[in-house]
Structures are given as structure tokens and as C-alpha cells.
Amino acid sequence: MDRESLYFMSKDDKNTFDFDESLPPLPLPELRDTLERYYTCIQPFGTPEELAQARKSIDEFRDGVGAELHEKLKQRAATMKNWLGTWWEDYGYHLLRLPLLPYQLMTMASQLEVVGVPETPEYMLKSFSRIIFHTLEFWDLTRKSAIKPLSSNGGKIKYSSALYKRFFSTSRIPGVEQDHIEKHFLTKDEGNTPTHVLIGAKGRQFIINCVHDDDTILTAPEILVALQRLRSILDYEPEGAGVPILSHDDRPSWANNRARLMEISDANKETLKLVEGASMGICWDENTPQDYEECSQLGLYGDTHSRWADHASSIIAYRNGRYNWTGEHSCYDGTVSVSFATFMQLSMLEVPEPDWGLAESTQVVELQELKFELDDTLKSEITRLRKEKDERGIDITATFTVFDEYGKDFMKSQRLHPDSFIQVVMQWTFHQMHEEIAPTYETALMRQYYNGRTETLRSCTGAVAEFLKASADSRVSDLALAKSFRTAVDDHKRAMDEARKGNGIDRHLFGLWCAAYENKLDIPAFYDDPLYAKSGGGGNFVLSSSTLGFTANVGFVAPMLIDGYGVFYSITSGAVFINTTAYRDSIKTSARKFNDTFKASFRRISVLLEQLAKESKL
């Protein structure tokens, strides 16, 4: 795996984004099929009485208003290659009124030590310069439409690249009732795009123009000189007003304060435009995390008075040489984050160390400080938010751990798919801790379709539920349990394959809800059936999970529910990298205990599978 073959298009390849037009349209399943899959998936969560009521609700929906709404979706699908359109971001994300941090943003520790880069205070300015330079390389590839589309199966299945255009110079703009996305990024074919990065530190904001007059990007030594000058300013001058903390409020309050900021002066409008249109938001955080778990935690609760929450993409640079990548989830999905993170690691590994001696004779890059005019109301709001942040403390626990006793090589040796393997072990972990079967969400990738994003896989299939029940039954032998596990893993793999073919459940049900909402129809009673929420519908999944692929890069978001978990993992040949999140105020959950039980479950299932393998050979 090298960055040249993964990210750089050959001379014979066409424009990155032209390829998207050849992708197939997003499939629209038949209503009857979706509802039957839904009924199958709710079986583990209902009593006979609840299931009978659900069956009645399903049938009435299918034969009544559901059919009418499905016709509206068919009409959309006849004229749109992706019938979901912007509904997923408009109604799945932008109606949420909670602050983006810590509740909605994606966070990922950079893990530069994996590729031999020192994460130390002594090397910090140099690693920071290299990171900004390689970020600009990624930006330049995207700007020139020369970044290779993601693919799988040896390039046979190619994925949409459309979301790359929302990685840079894009912000989620707050609204009193609903947010929206503003994208300032343009490819060279489309026009001129912003070329500056924003660096926030100690409550102040600075911008650096990152291209020369000949349109080439800054070099790492040039960036180093700028960072050295900025560090001197930060060390010897007073802190700033901390205006970015306003963006960490609930969305209606931030919308009102943002409007007030622009009302004060035209200069504020222009300054805000520079902030929100920056190619990348960077926060130079004075904290010094000692490991990747602390990095993960600070990704949610670090220097909020210097960090703008609304940026689609941000880099958090800590004083001691560690880094986080963060992303605004409505703009793009985790696969784009992983693509960027892997590019950064490979760049730091493969591209030789710059000649830092050039910094002594390099051209000085201009640092421009951005300042807002504030009135007493906004000053009071900044004070309020600082106080609220301190009083709230850390209400989401974010953990980072590695199970390094085996990885995908062992799982494949058992002829089991690694992701499905981990999904079943994860649900088993929850079952052991809480003696319950959890409604479980897993992300199913849909980027192989035109403007595709994700589908929900209801990961607790019938076979998985049977395995969980068997694991708690003392009458079930170890060999029978191992066989049940294998059946559960294979059933999960079957369900994932079906979801990725477009035979999912939740995006279709979501689309039907949107059709009712947009046509000002009453939301159907089907969505009020108790088993809809009890089985995870409407954002009620107790386990919210996703695989980040087959590198060491792993990131996370908050759990969906106060008594739920977020469990996110990546898989290498010999290890599983895990981020687990849980709410502090839950009297039920514990992220660290979950990790311990997760690892113990990995150990136990490997023993059971090896016993089964020996028995089968006898």
C-alpha cells in the first residue's frame, strides 16, 4: 500500500469527478420487501403481543398511506439519480439542535507514531509544518480533480468522489430551526477556490495564504517559518476574545449570535466569510495529551475558545506534538476521513524529511490576524459559554484501545468475514454486560451509487440473536456455541451484502417519512408503533457502530442514546483498533468496562473456534 497507487491518478485517467456520472442510480426497494425485512429485524425485540401489533401496523401502512408515499419516492427516483437527494443531511442531521461538539462531530487521533513520526514537543513545529504541507497536497489533488476515486475488489468497484468536494472550504451554517451547508470549494474547472487556512490559538484567529503567485502550494520550510513566528506571538502576547466558542452553543443560540455578529459591521461579515470559507480549520491547542485516549477525549473537550465547530474539516494540533483530525458529519462520512488520515500517514512515511535548512532563506509568508468587533451582548455570551463549558465538564467518555492478540488474519483463517466477526463479538459483549439484546446500528457503505452515502444495517439479525441467547444458556456446549457463532457471523455478512445492494430498511423508511413531511402530510402512525423505536428506528440504536476499514485509523462519534454506546473499530492483520464512547451520566454504561469485556470476548471466542476446528478434524 503506497500513496502513489492509492491517491494519484495516472495520465490516462479522466477527471476524478467526471467518473461519478457513470455510477448507477441509488436503488429504491419495493415497499413490500422493505417492510418484510423490517418485520424480520424487529423479531428479537418484541413480545408476541408487540409483534402482533407491529404486524397490524405494517400491513395498514403498506396498504394505505405507505403506498401513497412510496409512489412519491418512485416519482423522485424517475427524475433523480439519487432519490434521497439532500434529505439525509437536511432531516437526518440539520434539524438536530444540540451543539456540534461534543455531540455530533467525528474525531480521530492521527496515530503518527504508527509510521515512525515522533509525537514530541521537540519535533512539534516540524511535524506541524509537514502536516499542513501534506494537507495542501491533498487539497491540491482535489482542486485539480486528480485524486484517484476510492475503490475495492482490486479497483472493480469504484466509489463516488462527490464528498471530497465538501472536505475543504465548507461549513455547516447554523439556523434557528434548521442548519444548512455552505460549500466554497471549487475545482480548477469550476473556478477559483479559497486558498487560505485558518489557525485558531489562544482565542485568536490567523489566516495564511497557502499558494504562491504561480499557483504552487507552500513548502514545508515556508510553513515552518510562519509557524515559528506565530508561536512567538502566542507566547508573548495576550490571549484573544475567544469568539469561536460562540459556535459551540446549541444551534439556535449560535444562529442568533452569528446573525448579531454580522449585524454589528460589514467588516464582521467579511471576516466571517474568511473564517467559514477557509480551506481547512486548524486549532493550535495548548493541551498536552499523553496518549491516543487523551487525544480522543480532548477532541471533544479541548480549546473551544480557539476552534470553530462548523468547519467540515479541522486539524487539532496539540502543544506536545500530537494531533487529531475532526469532521462535521453532515458534510461527509467517515470513509472520507479515513482516506485523508491514510494519505497523511503514508505521506509522513514515504515523503523524505524536508531540508529544514531552507527555512533560513525562504520567503516570509504573511500572517493575517482576523478580529471581530464585539458588543456587550456578544461579550456576555462568550462569558456565558465559557462558564457553561466549565460547569458541564466531560459528559461523554471517549476511549481508545487496541486488541493486539489477533486481527483479520486469524478471522480469515476461520473463513469468517472480519467485520461480521467483530460485530457479533461486540453484541455479545453488550449482552454479557447488560443481559439484553441491543438494537444495533452499523454503517453500510453506499458510495458505489450516484452521490451515495450510507445505509443502516440492523446488525442484530435473527441468527445473531440466537447466538446471544445460546451464550447465556448453560445447557449449550462450547462446540454448539462456536457453531452458533459461525452461523451468526455468516448471517451478518449476508445482511450486509443485501444492504449494500440497496436492499436495506432504514433509508427507505426515512425517505417515506421525508415524503410525508415535505408534502405536509401527517406522519403515519407506523412510526409511532412501540417496536419502531424499541428496535432502533428514529435514531434509537443502543449500539451505534461502524468499521473504519483495514488500516490502524479509527475515529468516533457520540452514542445515539444516553444509555447507549458508540463502538468504532478498524482492523489490521494482527490487531483491532477500538474507540468506544459512552455518556458520563448514564448509570448503566461504562466505556472502559465495555472495552475490557470486548477484549475478553475476543479471547474466549478464539478458543471456542479453535476447539471446534480440532473437533471437526477428528
Image (tube, rainbow, N blue to C red):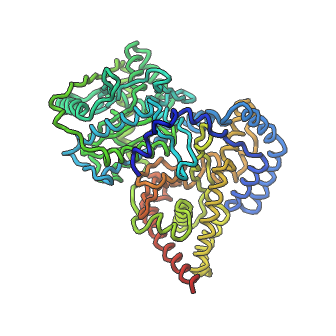
Give the vertical position of 477 relative to 30 (above or below).
Answer: below
Name of the residue lying farthest toward the bottom: 618
Q: Is residue 434 visible?
A: no
Q: Residue sitting at 70 percent across and 51 percent down?
A: 530
Q: Nearer the viewer, residue 132 or 383?
A: 132
In the rendered image, the quadrant that contains the C terminus is bottom right
Name of the residue lying farthest toward the front: 12
Name of the residue lying farthest toward the right: 63
Q: Residue sitting at 46 percent across and 41 percent down?
A: 105
Residue 137: x percent and y percent? 37, 35
Q: Residue sitting at 73 percent across and 54 percent down?
A: 37
Give the vertical position of 299 relative to 566 (above or below).
Answer: above
Q: Nearer the viewer, residue 134 or 372?
A: 134
Residue 34 horizontal side relative to residue 59, left or right: left
Q: How many marks are shown on the rendered structure? A: 0
Give the vertical position of 12 relative to 486 (above or below).
Answer: above
Residue 586 horizontal side relative to residue 514, left or right: left
Residue 441: x percent and y percent? 58, 53
Residue 229: x percent and y percent? 20, 29
Give the vertical position of 425 relative to 539 (above or below).
Answer: below
Q: Is residue 164 visible?
A: yes
The answer to which quarter of the image holds residue 142 is: top left
Residue 140 horizontal side relative to residue 75, left or right: left
Residue 306: x percent and y percent? 33, 33
